[in-house]
Amino acid sequence: MISILQPLIPHYREDFFKGLNNKYGIKVYCYEKEATLQGFNQSNFSHLYIKNITFGPFLIYSPFPLLKNNKKIVLMLHIGHITTWILLLTKKLHKRKITLWGHGISVKRYIAEEKKPSVIMKLMVSLADSIWLYTDKEKKIWSEIFPEKNIIALNNTISDVERIVSYKPKENLADLRKKYAITHEKCFIFCARFNTPYRRVDLLEDIIIKLGVENYGFIIIGEGDYKPDFSKYSNVYDFGSVYDGQIKDDLFSIADMYIQPAYIGLSLVEALAYGLPVFTFKRSIEIFQGVEYSYLIDGFNAVISEGVEDFINKLTLLPWHKIKEMGINANQYVKENLMINNMVLNAKKTLVNP
């Protein structure tokens, strides 16, 4: 049995935990409750609540349930978890193998930390037996620092990805557009929570305005405190929060391209799986991007721009057949790299070792 510590189990992580449980048997302990889920749907995967105390960014949790009847534990690569430090420093006493799981880098300080990782994070990584990171890019950074340590990239992905990559709409596109009153034949889709200014929705609005209302439609899925009033744009089709899977399938089938200027993460995996090229902006000190950004290959499955004017210039010069080709590449990239079973097998590289 393997113990795993998490804040909660969101819906997009459920299939990964099911895969691990089927192979190895796991117990997941969560230190947050449903009220703090921040807009995610909570998974029905069985888990246990672990007693804890939080103060600011720091967390103290009870270590005893994690240690009981388990030789291996997977904790979070989070420097604010005080109990994790204690468990790392007392490994010779409790004799458990510890895997740390996390981004391995700050999204907001990515450019600085990819050249010079956090000293405190270095210490934490050095104390662990093995490390789970989300993507190969972060694995490369840390493997250069600790070449002898067992560091793997999970290739972070989402539940339901196997279904999405194979999904074909039952209705033709003309009927789907009519069903949802979408008149534009060329459409972008945005699907994310408007819960942070780092999404840079100001750039999205600028694109909507500068492209004009005639040529491109914009399908919007999502709600949040930072959501602008899209009703003033006649080429924006705002569906708010969508919890019906069939509606979501339909809207992604209507769309030709996915757009999210910044703070992109697992939403890009969903878009690629549906066969949509991702349009976003280059990571910079002003444009934050999640670690999954490294899945995007400019000109292959994505269009990565330096700014709004560059975005519009690239879109204007891009032949329509090239957009369709990138969509095929996007879907194939997911099939080859981002299936749930692939993520489970990557985790196996640390779990099966003695």
Image (cartoon, helix red, strand yellow):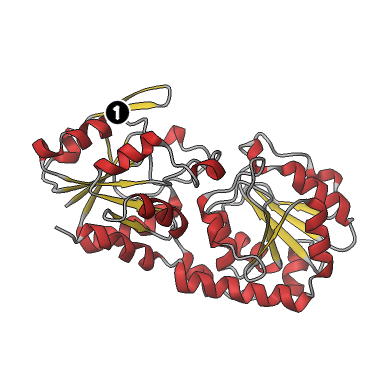
Most extreme residue toward the top, as rendered?
55
User: Residue 162, percent across and down?
Assistant: 46, 69
Above-or-below relation of 67 to 21: above
Q: Circle 1 sits on which residue?
A: 82
In front here: 220 or 326? 326
State the quadrant of the C terminus: bottom left
Write the residue at 70% across / 64% down: 257
- The percent coordinates of residue 320 (x first, y second) are 78, 75
Toward the viewer: 255 or 344? 344
Residue 289 screen position, x and y as percent: 59, 48
Q: Left of 237 or right of it: where is 95?
A: left
Q: Relative to 293, does residue 286 appear above or below in the rendering?
A: above
Query: Is residue 33 shown to the viewer in this render?
Result: no
Q: Is mark 1 on a helix, strand or loop?
A: helix
Q: Which residue is drawn at 23% across and 52% down?
A: 26
Would you say 169 lies left or right of 138 here?
right
Local packing at callout 1 (Cα closer than 10 Å; few below 14, some 14-19, many 20+) is: some
Q: Which amino acid does label 1 sit on?
A: Ile
Q: How many marks?
A: 1
